[in-house]
Image: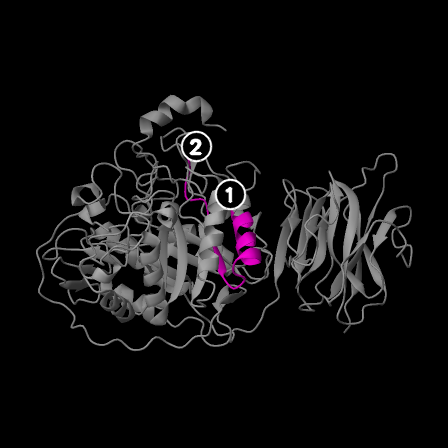
Amino acid sequence: MRTRLLAPLVLLLTGALLSPTSATARPERPEPAAAATTPAADPAPLPAWTPPLSTRGRYIVDADGRRFKLRSGNWHGSSGTWNGEGSPDDPANNHAGEVGHRAPLGLDRMPMAEIITDFRRLGLNSVRLPFSNEMIGDTQPVSGLTANPQLNGLRPLEVFDRVVGALTDAGFAVILNNHSTKSRWCCGVDGSERWNSGQSTQKWVDDWLLLAERYRSNPRVVGADLRNEVRRDVWDDPNWGLGDAHDWAAAAQQAGDRILKDANPDLLIMIEGINWAGIPVDGFWRDRPHLKPVATLSHTLVRSHKLVYAAHYYGYTGPRHSGATGIGETSDPRYRDLGRTELFAEMRRSAAYVAGTPDQHFTAPVWISEFGVAKDADARDRAWFTDTVDFLVEHDLDFAYWPLVGFHENDRGNQWGLIRYAADGTRRSVLDTDDWRGASWRALTSASGRQGVVEPVRSWSMLKATHADANRSLRAAADWDSGARKLTCPDDQRLIGISQRGQGGLCTDAGAAALGASGALNRVTSEAGVTTDWARGFTKYQCAEGQFMTGYSVRGDRVSAVLCSPARIALAGPGRTLWDDRGDSRPSSGEGGDYATGFHKAQCRADEYAAGIAFSTAVGRAGTPDALYCRGLPG
């Protein structure tokens, strides 16, 4: 990695690198208490919705196909509020003086049922509930939750259980969020930078399997947000696709597939982009990639329609600014320094394009799962927040405000929370008449956007087997071609595109949703099924009549086998040959997108299916996939 030679510099920056990146040490400018508060009227019931949730193109939908826009807030505390030094029970050693007691914040100040009622008043339908890996195995009983004494004496995970149950009983959807490794405040160089910081990837996956299985019987636990703000540690950057121990794209793929296969097939899988990479010093490379890498390397899960991408934005951070003040601060603009037009362009470029670009392998819902601002913010942060809300409304994006709950005394102290409680239970809210954020918040939560039933759209899914198998089928054996790299579509899709090199593929359900029928998948390693010489002089592996290609395998870049599935409808008729040995052979529409950037590709039309691959090992040929045989779907 590029950082090895920069160790002395990085060590100098350890206290400031990337800090703050997730509602960390924020400026507090106490203001005089204001008397204007909103009466605590009974909130309206939450709109009815039917779990489980899934996706249709860029939208999340419920089991009836109706749009379910995530109007969420973050109820933090179980992931830790302690700063890491001194007694965790001393407010001075906790972020903003707010002690969470290893439980969701505010349970020492207000009965849980009243807190949840306050969430309903805010117009939310879902809660992002952060946890730490340490919380799962923490056996020390919780204490200090004076407003909810029935929770004292329970283990943190048991308190978490009660909170999950109370939220879902009230009608909220709950998204579990792995926020940190240790139960402490996030997010700088703090030992929780990556999913495998302070623990192995296997431990992280196992923890996810435990929680996904634990709440499987509760259908309103709808999502697994795999890891919060993946970022650089002292030595190394995370990456998206290099295949090493720091490859976040690969780790998320592994965890998402295991959750859906082995623990809970109904969960949405939320994958955040890379939050920060590089050294935050002028003259050194640095970046906040967010979801930009998704355009060339997207995820295909073993169960289709379960993927949601996520990103975070705060005014004090920036596209190349870590958010630090002093050491670690660079000359780059922060988001709050960008004009409205420039801010909108940056948010589209770094995240929103994933939802806003239809008919691509990367098209998916985008959830802005953290953003927020203080009530006592200055003019620049106020303008940024107003513009950001306008962007979320204009682009109809799902969202989750950070944080839902905070503390106050006489309306002084940390002013970020949408709901803030005093030690005596006095409530302050974003809905109070003196809170400038209220107008934007009401506009955001009342924005209609797309509503009602979302009609199914065709799906495109990318396969990439450069570093590991891309076997996304539950029907296919995990090692259906031993020793070869395997590219296999999800069981409700079919293979429609290949790459000559680069070990890439494209899957779709366009024109024939769930084309596969029951029955064994067939591996083809000879020309026995060839019906016509559709690639003269080349070796041809072709599926039998009535079958379609659902995958293929390579050894290096050399064709090893094709995998065929029986179809639920009759498949036959003439075909055509597409060559990728000298250039691209893809539809001019660009449907599906570039699924193997930098390599020649062959791709059937959406009204066709792939029936075979041709290759040659003659002199000058390397046995690569040189041609694709496409046959028309029944009209």
Q: Is residue 528 shown left or right of residue 286?
A: right
**Identity, as a three-letter code, of the amino acid under mark 2:** Trp
Disc 1 packing (10 Å; few <14; some 14–19; many ≥20): some
Q: Position of residue 387 (x, y in %)?
A: 32, 57
Image quarter in which the C terminus is found: bottom right
| Residue 616 in which image quadrant | top right
Residue found at x 87% / y 47%: 539
Q: Which mark is residue 285?
A: 2
Q: For the residue labelled by badge 2, is the local secondary structure a helix, a strand or a loop?
A: loop
**Image height check: is 453 above or below 374?**
below
C-alpha distance separating marks 2 and 1: 31 Å
Q: Which mark is residue 202?
A: 1
**Identity, as a three-letter code, of the amino acid under mark 1:** Gln
Q: For the residue labelled by badge 1, is the local secondary structure a helix, a strand or a loop?
A: helix
Magenta part of the chain: 252-278
Image colouring: one colour
Q: Position of residue 268 (x, y in %)?
A: 49, 60
Mark 2, mark 1: which one is toward the viewer?
1
Does the magenta segment cover residue 267? yes
Q: Position of residue 249 (x, y in %)?
A: 53, 45
Residue found at x 91% / y 46%: 537
Comparing 244 with 451, the one in front is 244
Comparing 44 with 458, the one in front is 44
Does the magenta segment cover residue 481? no
